[in-house]
Each structure stands twice: as C-alpha cells, then as structure tokens.
Image (cartoon, rainbow, N blue to C red):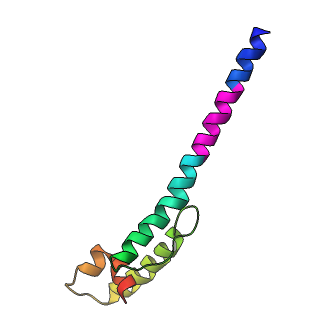
Amino acid sequence: MESLGLAGVLVAFSAALCLFLLFILTFSWWVFPNQTLKKLKKCGLGGPIPSFPLGNIKEMKTKNNIQSSVASSNLTHDIHSNVFPYFSSWQK
C-alpha cells in the first residue's frame, strides 16, 4: 500500500514538473518575444513579426546571405550595416 502512495507522489511530481517546463517553454518561446516586439515598436524600431517557436531565424539568415553577396561587390567604409545588418534592413 505504501508503494502505491509513493508511486502516486512520484507521478504527481513528474506531472507537475512537466507542466512547469511547458509553462516555461511557452513563455520563453511565445510570450517574451511578443512582449519584446511591442517594446521595440513603442521605441520606434520595427521589424518582422517573430514566428513560433524560434522567431524569424530563417528569414534573417536569408537576408544576411543576400546582403553578404551584395556587400561583397560594394565595398564601403560604412560599418553600421555590417555591425547591425538587421537594423539597417528594417529601417529601409
């Protein structure tokens, strides 16, 4: 009888742990990026809307590849587009 009680406690603890991890992942992948986007838009910085769960990483990589191929042909001393490529593309 005691072993069933201990097993029930372990099952309840593992279920609570899984729910807690689900809560943390939901906030870190969905809620926090949307809050950050709202804060940036209030400051006047726009940008692409992040997609669930990992944002717009694929979109940024394709833009970076396009910019690097164009940048190799146009050599300038303006380092802002190289240091902050996403901000320069979002401002255009």
Q: Identify the residue at image location x=54%, y=62%.
A: 54
Q: Is 55 left or right of 92, judged from the image as shown? A: right
Frontmost residue, 62 versus 24: 24
Most common secondary structure along the magenta stretch: helix
Q: Identify the residue at image location x=23%, y=79%.
A: 79
Q: Is 53 left or right of 86, judged from the image as shown? A: right
| Residue 38 drawn at (x, y percent) | 43, 71
The quadrant of the image that shows the N terminus is top right
Q: Identify the residue at image location x=64%, y=28%.
A: 13
| Residue 55 drawn at (x, y percent) | 52, 66
Is residue 14 within the magenta segment? yes
Frontmost residue, 27 versus 47: 27
Which residue is the extreme one toward the right?
1
Which residue is the extreme one toward the front?
42
| Residue 11 drawn at (x, y percent) | 71, 27
Q: Is 3 left or right of 22, judged from the image as shown? A: right
Frontmost residue, 68 versus 12: 12
The quadrant of the image that shows the C terminus is bottom left
Q: Which residues are magenta?
A: 11-22
Q: Identify the residue at image location x=75%, y=12%.
A: 3
76 w.r.t. 29: above or below: below
Which residue is the extreme one toward the left?
77
| Residue 34 drawn at (x, y percent) | 49, 66
All told, the count of numbered labels is: 0
Residue 84 falls in image quadrant: bottom left
82 w.r.t. 27: above or below: below
Is residue 69 within the magenta segment? no
